[in-house]
Image (cartoon, helix red, strand yellow):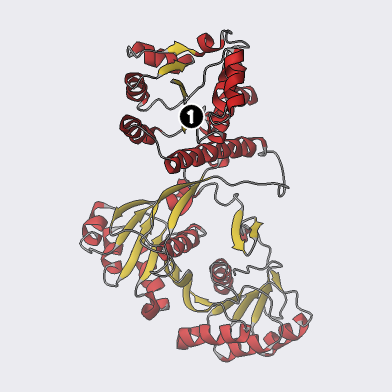
Amino acid sequence: MKAIISVSDKTGVVDFARGLAELGFDVHSTGGTHKALADAAVAVASVSKLTDFPEILDGRVKTLHPAVHGGILARRDQPSHLEELAKSGIDAIDLVAVNLYPFVETVTRPGVTLDDALENIDIGGPTMIRAAAKNFPHVLVVVDPTDYSTLLDLLRSGSVPLDERRRLALKAFQHVASYDTAIAQYLRTEEAGFPQNLTVSLSKLFDLRYGENPHQGAAVYQEQSVLWGGRTRGIVSAEQLHGKALSYNNFLDADAAWRASLDFSEPTAVVVKHTNPCGLACHQDLAEAYRRALSGDPVSAYGGIVAVNRELTGEAAEEIGKTFYEIIIAPAFSEEALTVLQKKKNLRILQLDEEAAAGCATALEYRRVSGGFLAQQPDAYLDDDIELKVVTKRAPTDEELADLRFAWKVVKHVKSNSIVVVKDRTLLGMGAGQPNRVTSVHLSLRRAENRARGAVLASDAFFPFPDGVELAADGGVTAVIQPGGSIRDQEVIEAADARGMAMVLTGIRHFRH
């Protein structure tokens, strides 16, 4: 029996090769793997001895030879294949253990050149992996060091079942597919728009407690991207400091809360329920920002998620601790904050710094539809740079303008049709996900109650009729921000003028379905 071992990740390879040798395998290897095995006194021969041909082109051609691929691809149940091997003096190869050059790690290092990247594109490795995986009923292929021990145990028992061989082959093809995806990502970095063909590489981090509902299974996957430095980005990179395992909905809500908090440069607290902010406020004192956020809808806040964009202080933790929450997210936690929050057995504490979110604003967003996926660029519009157009007779006051800009950032994170009512950079009420925009206005005003007097209102898309603005005015709202663009814009503006309201247009919308 013969085995070829050539691995970039040398974890456990010495013990694996030694175990194969003890089972009677002739082990062949190349380069650094050959050296590591020889240094460990494992009986190992070079692949050149197998091929009777030296490595050429600075090692670019080592295993690309009929003595290797004939030995791997020959079907043992086809007499003609075995006769051809014998005629050519080629021995069958029974096991291939290969994993590939660390392409992602290489191309994300500072100062890497195109030549560096090209030299780290493995050719012989993927070819051997694919050949062995194609012939998995007869040839064992292993790409993951965590499979070494199980495979040795099965070999010692006398046989490796077909189901296990199939599982190893599946992992092998996926290993190559992920590798090729990384190379395509690297070469695509200069390409604009949406590629004609696109693959996404995902690696499972862990199983979740359950999916959207307890009867649904779920898992969380990390997206591999050379654009992000090869590291995990976004909510999946959060470090859990305390609490029970996360569920599918926990991740969705946590992501919504964290993304909303990052849109604001001032100290900000966000309370999210079912992916919608039910409370959001900015204040230089983080504890006060949270108190104001909670005031937006203290009933809905129960069982929600809280995210802040500053280190969580002890005082803020004390305030947060008065309400039951599923998750608290912050870029850092003071010792006092952790002392307070870790007393709560079921509270999950997630730490996620801003650097972990970097790059997410440039990655494509995918959404499953029947039969395929939709892809879009993220809604990462720089709202602070919008030149607002005043369209009413009365311009907003400085205070109203500050709240209008704040409200415009908030409404972006509420599901369409979305309306938010804001005052003093505090979310007072919101209407989310309604087919009728007037209903969303009504819901936001009902939540805000008397606090809507002197407040401002933001709409994620234009008002198709004056009725929404008239209802807002009746509730005490004094200024409105909306995209504009309706064929009835003039009627809407005239309705605002008739009520003495100020209105500004953004020229863009923030639908969130």
Left or right of 451? Residue 465 is right
Q: Which of 445 and 370 lies nearest the eye of the viewer?
A: 370
Provide the secondary structure element on which disc 1 rests: strand
Left or right of 492? Residue 352 is left
Q: Which of 29 and 80 lies nearest the eye of the viewer?
A: 80
x 61%, y 59%: residue = 379
Compared to residue 225, the image places residue 459 above or below, namely below
Report which residue position mark 1 lands on: 99
In which quarter of the view is residue 74 placed? top right
x 56%, y 72%: residue = 415
x and y percent of residue 55 in the render? 58, 10
Q: Amino acid at mark 1?
A: Asn
x and y percent of residue 230 in the render? 51, 38
In which quarter of the view is residue 107 placed? top right
Compared to residue 7, the image places residue 26 above or below, namely above
x 58%, y 86%: residue = 439
x and y percent of residue 260 in the render? 49, 62
x 37%, y 24%: residue = 13
Disc 1 residue crowd, few under 14, some 14–19, many 20+, Cα 10 Å: many
